[in-house]
Image (cartoon, rainbow, N blue to C red):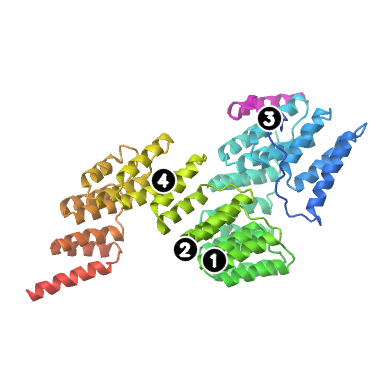
Amino acid sequence: MLRRSSSCIRLLSAFSSHLHLHQVMPFSANSFSLHHTPYSTSPTANPIKTFHHLISSFNHMLRMNPPPSLIQFTKLLSALVKLKHFQTVLSFSNQMEFVGIYPDNYTASIVINCFCHLHRVDFGFSVLGKMFKLGLEPDIVTFTTLINGLCKQGNLVEAVNCFDKIVALGYQPNAHTYSVIVDCLSKMGKFNVAFGLVEKMVERGCEPNVITYSCVIDSLCKYGLLKEAFHLFSKIRSEGILPDVVTYSSLIQCLCYSDQWGKASMLFNEMLDQNIAPSIITFSILVDEFGKEGMVDKARSVVGTIIQRGMEPDVITYNSLIDGCCLDRQMHQARNVLNVMTRKGCNPNVRTYNILIHWYCKWRMMDEAEQLLDEMLCRGLTPDNYTYNALIRGLCYTRSLGEAMKFFKDLCARGYLPDIVGYSTLLQGFCELKNFDVVLSLLHQMKTRNLKPNICICNILIDGMCKAGRFKDAKKLFSMLSVGGLQPNVQTYNIMINGLCKEGLLDEAYNVFKKMKENCCSPDNISYNVIIHGFLRRKSFSKGIELIHEMRQQGFVVDNTTVALVVDFCARRISF
């Protein structure tokens, strides 16, 4: 016991340096207000009644003298965790400690789990420190919860380091611990390391399960390594490990992304033949893919199947269907889906409104987009950069830049912090109007907000300068890109080549074209056609034809304008 406690203290010390535990009050949930998180799908008939019953039970138990055992409180906290009321659990654990009911190992692990779900792993490690002070001994479940929390928060390297330290201190990871870290390594693309860990897992007498392998398969699919994913899929089946709905869903989604609909359908049917019931996630994948492919009727049919099976579509499913309707310009149907989901008690989220606002703006229906913004605010949802960028873009292209700028200024006055995308939309608009006074003003604002222009912004500025005939400024900015740490992309070179060709500066344009290849930026179809247009328009027929041959050798296609210029040049020569 003393050896393990000493190890725990060393472990805590190792973590404290980068997690700043001294800055966090152990077991304090005071910074979390008692706002309840959305209800999860639950087998309970009425989750709301269950929740209120648990609240009432807790208050009653807390007033009892003497109070019930810690076990009764822990059961209640576990029930709240199942309902995903993590902040309520933190508040209750704080109240328990205030009246002298201190946690045991299991209760403390519940609290750590809640902090991890709320993306506050630092507070979770603070609870670990409190456990040491109370003389409690964290077990592998506690550490697995923290490792999983680090993974969910995106701190994958820290999660792997945490795992290594725990093993070095003598803790024996279980199948769940290994699965969490294998998932973490796979997400990082370190598949060889992940497979090596699976081998070590077997050597240490801990058999990998379907969850372990499903983690790897899912990441292989996300990296586009479909062949490797199916190889592993076949391997685990040959070893007698039966794939589950998560395994099948990952592979089906990857097949859909690869436009292998036939194989996806076969795999879906195989899953049904194995008596593996599709989950709401599986169905949502199909709804999303059918919507993106323009098969909205099939997407609706899938939603109908979900309901027929006694399942409730979730917000992700509805969002996918709304996106599909919008993509197909069925905006009225998309709005109907929003009405149906709210009527069925499925609350739309920020993404729901962002999808609709984006498409209303794209289809130039600004009145409807603005109505949705008001509705969104009435629901207590906070618009994000995506929301406002869509509206700014819509106002620029459907009404006027002046109105877009007014909207932008009003937002900034209310504390909105625009991102680089919002600025780029306005910069493009004012560059097209050749209003460089406003352009300079916007660039100054960006500087004061510590927003450094990216290559997209620079492309907009160079293009605007070229179109305004300010070639000296355009060339100066182009030459300064590398000094500012930016690498010109193919679009940058195309803008410069096009501008110089239109100005008749063919030698300079061709030098930029050659420099493009020297800087390992391969010309694309546009690059070749633009430089060829320049030579043909300046009657440099031989150079134009030479570049056409080079272009075709690179696998690119001559556009209609180039063909017309060649035909026109040949006709003039024959006529002459």
Dominant secondary-structure state across the stretch colored magenta: helix
Disc 4 secondary structure class = helix
Q: Amino acid at mark 3?
A: Ser
* Front residue of 33 and 204: 33
Q: Amino acid at mark 1?
A: Met
Mark 1 nearby-residue class (10 Å; few <14, some 14–19, many ≥20): many
Q: CA distance from mark 3 to mark 1?
A: 49 Å
Q: CA distance from mark 3 to mark 2?
A: 50 Å
Residue at 64%, 68% in the rendered image: 302
Question: Which is more N-terminal, label 2 or label 3?
Answer: 3
Residue 129 image offset from top left, x and y in percent: 70, 27
| Quadrant of image for the N terminus | top right
Is residue 218 something one can see in this rendering? Answer: no
Find out whether residue 13 is within the magenta segment. yes
Nearer mark to the viewer, of 3 and 2: 2
Mark number displayed over residue 363: 2
Mark number displayed over residue 126: 3
Tag 4 residue: 423
Question: Which is more N-terminal, label 1 or label 3?
Answer: 3
* Front residue of 563 and 63: 63
Q: CA distance from mark 1 to mark 4?
A: 28 Å
Residue at 24%, 48% in the rendered image: 515
Nearer mark to the viewer, of 3 and 4: 4
Find out whether residue 386 is within the magenta segment. no
Kindly give the residue lying farthest to the left in the view shown: 576
Tag 1 residue: 331
Q: Which residues are magenta?
A: 1-25
